[in-house]
Image: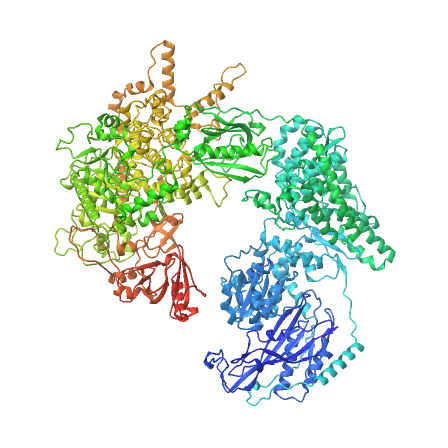
């Protein structure tokens, strides 16, 4: 019996501490006044009575009641029942001492105020309704002045009402106010009472939200409720607590948290708490707290909180049941607001059943909900009792839970939710309370015992689900209300409105003596009249379904029978010493051991052989057994969820071999390198299992039911799982089968829990001597087992080589992490860094082992209640055991090293190139498989070639692996993998996991990644010392990053270099001081601050407007052109050259010019007819418009340009020097190619200079532009004029190409349309309605241009205005198509036919004065910068050469798509295609001016010439193209390819590789148009980074001149450096004895000898001269250069080594007679199919060569024979190919798409102002089913029918596939937000016709107009969502400034102006980029007198903006408006 309440307290308002209407609570009276001994009084109760604070109120509040919960230090909960009412108090307002006025107070003070007063009952019982009644009676007696003494009521509550414990009878009582009350204890005290709390929680939050909170509470997250009602807070917290039954919440639990204690929420421990909604705003600072709004029904989960998912199928079953609750009787009218809509399943019924007359009560729903969650836990924990381990029975039972065993059998190792629940404190308490096998049972025990059978029945009959739930709900209801006849209570209540009486006296002071007297009398009376109670019925707890019964044993047997048979045979072969037979099937056994069943079967088989006295093994037997044990441990995790490690533990300490007399080696010395032995949880679980077996054997003989069979001690699995499925592994052994048969007939063996239950049942009947004996026996059993395990741990923890560092793989011994070693240490550099020990501790092996074992002993012995004497003796024993074992292992280690070494494969010598030398000879390694499929024998088929065992060698050129596969079935093959050392991009240490065929794999390996798409993952053999590994890494880094290019293999490989000449360049700046001085002075001179020095300058050049590095926004923002590269020793200043660096000018030596013109790039100028600078008559020819200028012959204009340049003949050199400054790096426009038919020119240059830092320092700000800039600009205009005049298109027309009938730019626009626009467009109108749909303008894949839209001009007095009347019917669907012409006309008004098109960057085209360049058009284009190419290449490498197998989520094609590599290739092809069309179709010249002119410019120019000129598609022509565009024009190969150590930091940028990929794409589409084949391109792609050839070295021609090998005689090895005429006055900076080899000489040499580079399909006469490839992504393919892998001979691009390896392999493959095999087997995963595949042309040429040799004739070169072949002219005349109509359509369609791509680039470049913004609007896509044929506007594929659903833009009608969605450009034509009206899409489109774009009227010949945005237009007023003044803080080191802000709905922008009247926008913030907007406080540097709550923060993708509004209300308005838009 216990008291109903412990304390009664009266708490009132403390007027003494009143401060402006706010104070504290004060305890007025408390009863009893002294504390109970069993229940001390709780302090600070007054805080919980008024959680939001004690304040006065101007109005009388009605009485309130709620229950708060307090938790004491013993974790016992105390319930505070609080009834609060108001009392009047007279106030006389006075001014406070500190001068604060009354207005500043939180409460407005009146003369009559009301203070709160609380009546509180404190109890340890949770009878909330009874407490409410009792306090209500006291209040009623007070307010209605009942004839009752209040003292009597209080005394009766505290002393006269006694509550029986759970299971007791109903108590009926009265507290003396004429009341009748009843109190019913629950039947079971362990089952919580909920009444209707859980149903109310579901009604408030809904099913999904409650399940989320349920998951959060179980996984130890912080949960905070807030509501206006305190009672709802208590009910919600109670509900979450009750739903966790049978688990108990063990963390902080405060349903009502007072405001002063708000800091409690910052605790790091989990909690469930509740606060009033007035404090909800403060929860924003709680970053890891789940906030629940009970009133709003929402749950907010922070981003940092990751909730695990509830396990299936339990959660699905629970959700389904929650929606099915009482479907037959629920009333929709009453429960329509409830989330658990039980009528959900009846919603579609045609004839639903009628609603019941009486709806179910909320309490009934509550019990059904609880029943569902109890069943959820019963199903989740099914089998948990099978995993309980009995450690002690007497005097008190100690039982633990084998978590790993449970997770392994249930298959929940990876179920994060289950793992975290099992690791929580709640489950620990659950095991401690419910693990006892002999106790009182409750509802959960019954449900748990029957849940498996119920689920089986329900699967057959789903209707049984609700039946079982209702039965369980009825039991829960009976538990709370066991009395079937309810007692009618009588509780007096106050009269209505009594609280609001005016003249109400205060609550009286109670007579303390009277209360205590009644209290004492009540206690004495209760001691006399004690109610007899029934004791709790204790019984054996039902076991439930065994966990082994949950596994489908038959399926396991069927899947593993064959594997187990092979396993048994192999083990029998081993123990019968048939080693050869065992090795044959050994790989199959290793593969079989991936199965859990096979691993456990292996341990059983080995234990059987131990019982047969076969523990002593021979050496080979020992090795194989150790391999099997290691394989088992490798395949298992450190958690040991399958019990494999526990089963191996006794095996490893039993099997041994004799090394010599007296010295034996046990198997445990070879299986120590596994993470499981470092896991403390494993040792504890294994120890407890063995103790349970000993306890079981201790008590088993006492029971007649138990017949102990064979004694299997520790070699069996857990006794609780005797009937394991693994016994099937013994069905082939006669003895084992007999054993199983015998066991099936014997009596059932009692389990450990049953024995413990029986012992606990008989324990009270035993004598004290017997009890003491049992306690002693159990303690001795645990102690002896602790000694045994201490020795085992020493065996497994002390390594064989005790001098080695013992690295602890788990830093925290008590860590609950059971992750595998590979995953836990995957990112660490070394294990030392993860161990958590100091270096001194780790080196001391003995100390670390002693510490580990001691901690284990302390843990298990204290938990098992071993005596302190025994624990002390164990501590004394452990150091001695460790020392003895270390001494023993020293002898074992010494003798084991004397054993004959295991026969390893012979190290194969790699085949080397001429001049290649070995730096580090072969280190024995394993080549491990990576993410590629080659060599794995998987989907690609073939043998399993990886892993391979061999050696890795480092040469001065390559890293080479050569070895043989570890798989014995493929060991005859030779595996070779190599790559040049210069291509190494990343080297890192990786953690290794188990790999088949490798016995003992080291923990760490080395991963080498090369930029030629090669990857080596290697593991060094144990014989390789760490010093050798470190030397290998250091030397590879040294050879990868030489100090200069002359230390690379290209120069040092073929001959021995002279170090003095190679390593000592001329030092221009010998010290940092001199360098700094020169740099400062040079900058000062350029800026005009210091005086210019005239001497030492050969040419006095004009001062550049800015520094050498570009200061434009694009380049400075990370274009990667110059800003990220280190300074080069040879490229320190690209603009000005000191005269002293050269002896004399080349102009004075015609021999040098003549020699230079022999180079392929300059020979191309002569081929095109540009003339020869050595010919003096060239300049005299008036007919020649161009000349080859020698202005840059000594590189005085630009170091990065070639010496000879093609410029207009009538433009002087002095003018070139002056205007070169207008371009970056002084790379002014030069002619590089001329169209042979249209005579249009292709020019290249760098981007235009902006007004940079140097220009601002030089010029006078008051006078405007400086004279130098004006002069340069005038010369630039003259130069452009010369280019225009030299273009025939500017003065006359030309004949069209035979392949094109559309001969102008207008033909590009009107592809597929009959009418042609005029040559000169009409004058621009002042205003243009802009509503047209342009949805395909950005898409080159559309099927016809007529779908783009309508281009129409209104003819106002102009008879020449053209119209496009041909409208696509598809456009009419969107409405408003008739007035769209002017928008497009505004955008393309500059697209008239001009003589010169300049394609440049958007950022630099804005400042160009177009009127200064007549007949020129400047087109801004999109292109990918170098930084994008770098990032894309990294992703492409990871996709094509992954380091680990790809998953389904990250497939190969998905990774390639994410890399955006093909998009970049497409971009280059589109820009080149536009250039081709402008040159060939339009006849206009094109100038490419992108970035610095040496990256993207080179790509576009090269591809354009390749498409236009067939000459460049020959081998000789391609050589000229590369020499001219890439080498002469200064592509920075050394910098981009990171060839030296100075360039390593910039990152690899494969610009040239991207160009070769584009050529490959064109070659693939036009295979008949190229003389060279694909191997030729792959060969160049490989060797341009291999550093084998000198060709692709240095950054420009100037550096190659300094190197002395630019003007060689094409025989570099024979150059005589003494010939001054070849030097031309230059003194080579690097004197080299070896000039290196040119790749073109190498290709020419091999091309003469073989057909390796020849494309036999080459047919130049049958193909068009101009190629127009498709650039659709669907037409592009991934280059096989990225994917091919040649394991047979390494990369095929090392032709010499490849041929030699193939020859060696063919010589080895002979038949029995020694003759070579005629039959050849080719594997795609091993051989290079392109090399092995027979080629008829190659074969016939070889046959002809052989016949000539046999006949003794002169052997002709194959090229001569090929060229002499005659075409079958006779047959060719008879065969005439008729082009079909479809073929012509295809060709026409291809040209149309190509032209459309050109038009897209031009129109996008010209679309400025409003039109450009319109095309950046995103689409609003929705899923759409097409009933008529439709096509994807992105890829052109069909969309049609129910199965062909796609995405449809609701604004502009854009259609696309779902897969194309991410690539669709943001070019929606919607200009306004869709209004909330019923207008159709057509009406919406028409409604925007009134919007206008204002532009000024300009002359016809001016450039495009820029539409400016005026904030005062009508359209703006409509689209302005909000506007006003805000303070905005500037960027770094800038202050606050007031701006006028406009939130524009149309532009989706937040723009700001200087003032409201300002019309020029100063800047804007794109709302698309906004991530969040929120209020902030405590802003540093804020303006004075600013409102602290008026600050808010706007976070975008780029930066964070801070704003300050006038007040907090305005700030919140801005936040809300911006929120509504994002």
Q: Return the x and y of residue 1383 as percentages of the image width and height.
A: 24, 55
One can see residue 555 in this view: no
Q: Quadrant of residue 666?
A: top right
Q: Quadrant of residue 657?
A: top right
Q: Depth check: 838 or 1331 in front?
A: 838
**Number of marks in picture:** 0
Q: Quadrant of the C terminus?
A: bottom left
Q: Depth check: 154 or 1600 in front?
A: 1600
Q: Quadrant of residue 887?
A: top right
For residue 293, above or below residue 1224: below
Q: Return the x and y of residue 1280 as percentages of the image width and height.
A: 19, 42
Q: Return the x and y of residue 552 as percentages of the image width and height.
A: 64, 46
For residue 1523, above or below residue 174: above
Q: Depth check: 974 or 1491 in front?
A: 1491
Q: Depth check: 1055 or 1505 in front?
A: 1055
For residue 1997, above or below residue 188: above
One can see residue 729 in this view: yes
Q: Quadrant of the N terminus?
A: bottom right
Give the image's coloring scheme: rainbow
Q: Return the x and y of residue 1419 as percentages of the image width and height.
A: 25, 47
Q: Is residue 1730 left or right of residue 760?
A: left
Q: Is residue 613 left or right of residue 1673?
A: right
Q: Residue at x 66, y 43 (%)?
A: 677
Q: In the current view of this chain or complex, which residue is farthest to the top?
A: 1752
Q: Is residue 1453 left or right of residue 1527?
A: right
């Amino acid at each position: 019996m216990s008291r109903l309440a412990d304390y009664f307290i009266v708490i009132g308002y403390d007027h003494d501490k009143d401060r402006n209407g706010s104070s504290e609570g004060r305890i007025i009276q408390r009863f009893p006044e002294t504390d109970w001994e069993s229940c001390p009084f709780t302090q600070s109760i007054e805080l919980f009575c008024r959680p939001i604070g004690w304040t006065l109120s101007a109005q009388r509040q009605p009485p309130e009641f709620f229950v708060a919960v307090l938790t004491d230090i013993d974790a016992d909960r105390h319930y505070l029942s609080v009834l609060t009412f108001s009392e009047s108090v007279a106030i006389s307002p006075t001014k406070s001492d500190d001068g604060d006025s009354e207005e500043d107070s939180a409460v407005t003070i009146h003369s009559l105020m009301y203070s709160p007063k609380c009546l509180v009952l404190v109890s340890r019982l949770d009878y909330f309704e009874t407490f409410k009644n009792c306090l209500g009676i006291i209040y009623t007696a007070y307010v209605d002045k009942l004839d009752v003494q209040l003292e009597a009521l209080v005394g009766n509550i505290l002393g006269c009402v006694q509550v029986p414990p759970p299971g007791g009878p109903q108590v009926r009582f009265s507290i003396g106010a004429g009341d009748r009350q009843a109190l019913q204890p629950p039947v079971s005290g362990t089952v919580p009472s909920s009444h209707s709390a859980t149903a109310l929680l579901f009604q408030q939050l809904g099913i999904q939200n409650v399940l989320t909170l349920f998951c959060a509470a179980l996984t130890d997250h912080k949960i905070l409720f807030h509501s206006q009602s305190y009672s709802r807070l208590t009910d919600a917290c109670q509900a979450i607590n009750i739903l966790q039954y049978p688990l108990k919440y063990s963390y902080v639990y405060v349903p009502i948290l007072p405001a002063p204690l708000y800091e409690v929420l910052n605790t790091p421990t989990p909690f469930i708490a509740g606060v009033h909604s007035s404090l909800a705003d403060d929860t924003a600072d709680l970053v890891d707290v789940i906030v629940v709004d009970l009133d709003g029904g929402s749950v907010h989960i922070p981003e940092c909180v990751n909730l695990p998912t509830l396990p299936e199928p339990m959660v699905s079953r629970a959700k389904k049941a929650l929606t099915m609750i009482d479907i037959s009787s629920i009333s929709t009218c009453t429960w329509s607001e409830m989330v658990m809509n039980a009528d959900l399943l009846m919603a579609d019924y045609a004839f639903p059943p009628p609603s019941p007359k009486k709806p179910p009560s909320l309490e009934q729903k509550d019990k059904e909900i609880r029943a569902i969650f109890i069943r959820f836990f019963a199903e989740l924990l099914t089998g948990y009792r099978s995993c309980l381990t009995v450690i002690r029975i007497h005097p008190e039972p100690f039982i633990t839970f084998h978590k790993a065993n449970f997770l392994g059998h249930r298959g929940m190792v990876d179920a994060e939710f289950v793992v975290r629940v099992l690791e929580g404190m709640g489950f620990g308490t659950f095991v401690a309370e419910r693990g006892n096998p002999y106790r009182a049972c409750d509802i959960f025990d019954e449900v748990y015992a029957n849940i498996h059978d119920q689920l089986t029945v329900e699967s057959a009959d789903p209707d049984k689900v609700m039946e079982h739930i209702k039965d369980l709900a009825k039991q829960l209801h009976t538990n709370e209300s066991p009395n079937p006849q309810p007692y009618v209570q009588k509780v007096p209540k106050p009269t209505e409105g009594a609280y609001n009486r005016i003249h109400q006296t205060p609550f009286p002071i109670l007579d303390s003596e009277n209360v205590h007297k009644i209290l004492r009398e009540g206690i004495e009376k209760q001691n006399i009249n004690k109610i007899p109670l029934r004791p709790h019925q204790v019984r054996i707890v039902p076991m439930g379904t065994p966990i082994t019964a949950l596994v489908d044993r038959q399926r396991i047997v069927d899947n593993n029978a064959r594997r187990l048979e092979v396993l048994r045979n192999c083990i029998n072969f081993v123990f019968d010493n048939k080693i050869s037979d065992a090795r044959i099937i050994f790989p199959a056994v290793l593969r079989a051991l991936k199965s859990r069943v096979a691993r456990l079967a292996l341990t059983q088989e080995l234990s059987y052989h131990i019982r047969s006295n076969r523990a002593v093994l021979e050496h080979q037997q020992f090795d194989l057994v150790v391999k099997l044990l290691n394989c088992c441990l490798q395949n298992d995790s450190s958690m040991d969820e399958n019990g494999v490690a526990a089963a191996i533990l006794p095996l490893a300490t039993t099997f041994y071999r004799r090394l010599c007399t007296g010295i034996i080696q046990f198997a445990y010395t070879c299986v120590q390198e596994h993470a499981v032995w470092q896991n403390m949880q494993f040792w504890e679980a294994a120890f407890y299992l063995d103790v349970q077996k000993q306890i079981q054997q201790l008590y088993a003989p006492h029971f007649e039911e138990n017949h102990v069979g064979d004694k299997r001690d520790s070699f069996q699995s857990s006794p609780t799982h005797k009937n394991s499925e693994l016994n099937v592994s013994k069905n082939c052994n006669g003895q084992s089968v007999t054993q199983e048969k015998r066991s099936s007939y014997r009596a059932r063996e009692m389990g450990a829990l049953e024995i413990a239950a029986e012992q606990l049942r008989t324990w009270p009947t035993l004598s004290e001597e017997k009890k003491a004996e049992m306690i002693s026996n159990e303690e001795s059993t645990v102690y002896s087992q602790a000694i045994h395990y201490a020795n085992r741990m020493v065996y497994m923890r002390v390594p064989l080589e005790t001098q080695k560092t013992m690295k602890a793989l788990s830093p925290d011994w008590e860590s609950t992490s059971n992750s595998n070693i590979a995953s836990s240490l995957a990112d660490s550099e070394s294990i030392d860094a993860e161990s958590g020990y100091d270096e001194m501790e780790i080196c001391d092996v003995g100390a670390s082992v002693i510490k580990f074992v001691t901690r284990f002993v302390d843990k298990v012995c204290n938990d098992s209640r071993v005596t302190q004497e025994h624990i002390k003796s164990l501590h004394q024993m452990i150091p001695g055991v460790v020392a003895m074992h270390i001494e023993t292992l020293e002898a074992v280690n010494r003798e084991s090293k004397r054993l004959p070494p295991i026969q390893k494969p012979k190290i194969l010598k790699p085949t080397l190139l001429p001049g290649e030398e070995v730096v580090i000879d072969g280190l024995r390694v394993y080549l491990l498989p990576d993410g590629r499929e080659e060599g794995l024998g998987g989907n690609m088929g073939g043998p399993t070639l990886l892993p391979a065992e061999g050696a890795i060698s480092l040469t001065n050129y390559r890293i080479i692996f050569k070895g043989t596969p570890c798989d014995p079935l493929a060991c005859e093959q030779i595996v070779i993998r190599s790559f040049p050392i210069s291509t190494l991009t990343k080297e890192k240490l990786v953690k290794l996991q188990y790999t088949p065929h490798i016995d003992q794999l080291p923990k760490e390996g080395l991963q080498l990644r090369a930029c030629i798409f090669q990857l080596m993952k290697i593991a060094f053999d144990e014989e390789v010392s760490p010093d050798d590994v470190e030397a290998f890494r250091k030397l590879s880094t040294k050879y990868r990053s030489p100090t200069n290019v002359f230390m690379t293999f290209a120069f040092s490989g073929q001959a021995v270099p002279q170090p003095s000449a190679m390593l000592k360049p001329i030092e221009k700046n010998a010290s940092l001081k001199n360098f700094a001085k020169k740099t400062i002075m040079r900058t000062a001179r350029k800026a005009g601050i210091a005086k210019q020095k005239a001497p030492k300058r050969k040419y006095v050049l004009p001062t550049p407007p800015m520094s050498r590095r570009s200061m434009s926004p694009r380049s400075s923002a990370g274009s990667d052109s110059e800003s990220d590269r280190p300074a080069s020793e040879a490229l320190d200043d690209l603009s000005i050259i000191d005269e002293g660096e050269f002896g004399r000018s080349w102009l004075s030596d015609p021999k040098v010019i003549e020699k230079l013109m022999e180079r392929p790039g300059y020979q191309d100028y002569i081929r095109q007819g540009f003339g020869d600078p050595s010919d003096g008559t060239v300049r005299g020819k008036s007919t020649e418009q161009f000349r080859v200028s020698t202005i840059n012959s000594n590189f005085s204009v630009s170091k990065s340009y070639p010496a000879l340049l093609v410029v207009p003949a009538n433009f002087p050199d002095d003018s070139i020097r002056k205007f070169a400054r207008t371009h970056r790096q002084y790379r002014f426009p030069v002619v590089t190619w001329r169209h042979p038919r249209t005579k249009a020119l292709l020019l290249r240059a760098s981007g235009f200079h902006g007004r940079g830092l140097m220009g601002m320092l030089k010029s006078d700000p008051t006078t405007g532009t400086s004279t130098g800039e004006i002069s340069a600009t005038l010369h630039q205009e003259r130069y452009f004029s010369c280019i225009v005049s030299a273009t025939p298109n500017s003065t006359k027309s030309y004949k069209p190409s035979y392949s094109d009938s559309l001969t102008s730019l207008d033909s590009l626009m009107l592809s597929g349309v009959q009418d042609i626009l005029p040559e000169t467009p009409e004058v621009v109108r002042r205003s243009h309605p802009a509503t047209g749909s342009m949805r395909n303008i950005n898409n080159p894949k559309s099927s016809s241009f007529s779908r783009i839209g309508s281009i129409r001009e209104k003819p106002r007095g102009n008879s020449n205005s053209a119209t496009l009347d041909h409208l696509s019917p598809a456009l009419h669907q969107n409405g408003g198509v008739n007035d769209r012409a002017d928008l497009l006309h505004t955008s393309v008004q500059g697209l008239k036919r001009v003589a010169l098109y300049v394609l440049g960057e958007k950022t630099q085209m804005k400042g160009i004065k177009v009127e200064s360049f007549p007949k020129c058009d400047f087109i801004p284009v999109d292109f990918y910068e170098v930084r994008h190419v770098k990032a894309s290449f990294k992703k492409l490498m990871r996709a094509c050469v992954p380091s680990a197998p790809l998953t389904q989520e990250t497939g190969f094609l998905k990774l390639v798509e994410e890399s955006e590599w093909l998009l970049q290739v497409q971009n280059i092809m589109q820009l080149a295609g536009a250039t081709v069309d402008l040159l060939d179709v339009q006849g206009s010249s094109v100038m490419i001016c992108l970035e610095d002119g040496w990256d993207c410019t080179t790509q576009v120019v090269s591809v354009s010439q390749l498409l236009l000129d067939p000459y460049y598609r020959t081998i000789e022509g391609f050589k000229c193209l590369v020499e001219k565009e890439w080498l002469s024009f200064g592509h920075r190969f050394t910098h981009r390819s990171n060839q030296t150590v100075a360039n390593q930091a910039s990152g690899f940028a494969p610009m040239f590789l991207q160009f070769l990929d584009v050529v490959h794409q064109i070659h693939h589409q036009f295979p008949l148009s190229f003389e060279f084949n694909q191997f030729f391109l792959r060969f160049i792609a490989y060797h341009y980074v291999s550093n084998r050839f000198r060709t692709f070295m240095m950054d420009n021609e100037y550096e190659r001149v300094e190197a002395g090998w630019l003007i060689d005689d094409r025989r570099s090895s024979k150059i005589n450096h003494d010939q001054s005429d070849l030097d031309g006055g230059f003194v080579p900076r690097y004197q080299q004895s070896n000039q290196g080899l040119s790749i073109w000489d190498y290709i020419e040499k091999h091309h003469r000898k073989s057909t390796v580079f020849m494309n036999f399909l080459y047919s130049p006469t049958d193909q068009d001269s101009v190629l127009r490839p498709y650039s659709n992504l669907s037409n592009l393919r991934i280059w096989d250069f990225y994917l091919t892998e040649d394991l047979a001979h390494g990369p095929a691009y090392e032709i010499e080594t490849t041929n030699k390896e193939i020859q060696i392999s063919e010589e080895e493959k002979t038949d029995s007679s020694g003759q070579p095999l005629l039959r050849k087997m080719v594997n795609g995963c091993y051989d290079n199919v392109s090399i092995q595949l027979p080629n008829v042309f190659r074969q016939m040429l070889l046959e002809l060569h052989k016949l000539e040799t046999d006949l003794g004739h002169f052997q002709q070169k194959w090229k001569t024979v090929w060229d002499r072949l005659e075409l079958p002219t006779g047959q060719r005349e008879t065969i005439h190919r008729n082009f079909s109509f479809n073929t012509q359509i295809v060709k026409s369609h291809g040209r149309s798409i190509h032209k459309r791509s050109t038009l897209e680039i031009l129109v996008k470049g010209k679309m400025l102002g409003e039109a450009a913004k319109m095309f950046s609007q995103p689409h609003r896509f929705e899923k759409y089913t097409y009933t008529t044929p439709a096509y994807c506007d992105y890829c052109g594929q069909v969309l049609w029918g129910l199965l062909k659903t796609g995405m449809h833009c609701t604004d502009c009608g854009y259609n696309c596939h779902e897969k194309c969605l991410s690539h669709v450009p943001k070019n929606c034509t919607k200009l306004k937000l869709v209004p909330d009206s019923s207008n159709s899409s057509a009406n919406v489109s028409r409604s925007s016709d009134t919007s206008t774009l204002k532009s000024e009227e300009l002359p016809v010949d001016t450039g495009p107009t820029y539409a400016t945005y005026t904030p005062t237009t009508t359209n703006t007023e409509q689209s302005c969502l909000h506007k006003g003044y805000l303070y905005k803080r500037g960027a770094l080191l800038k202050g606050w400034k007031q701006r006028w802000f406009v939130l524009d709905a149309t532009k989706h922008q937040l723009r700001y102006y200087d003032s409201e009247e300002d019309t020029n926008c100063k800047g804007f913030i794109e709302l698309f980029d906004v991530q969040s907007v929120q209020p902030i406080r405590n802003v540093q540097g804020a303006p004075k007198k600013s409102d602290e709550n008026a600050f808010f923060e706007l976070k975008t993708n780029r930066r964070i903006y801070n704003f300050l509004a006038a007040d907090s209300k305005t700030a919140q308005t801005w936040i809300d408006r911006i929120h509504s838009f994002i």
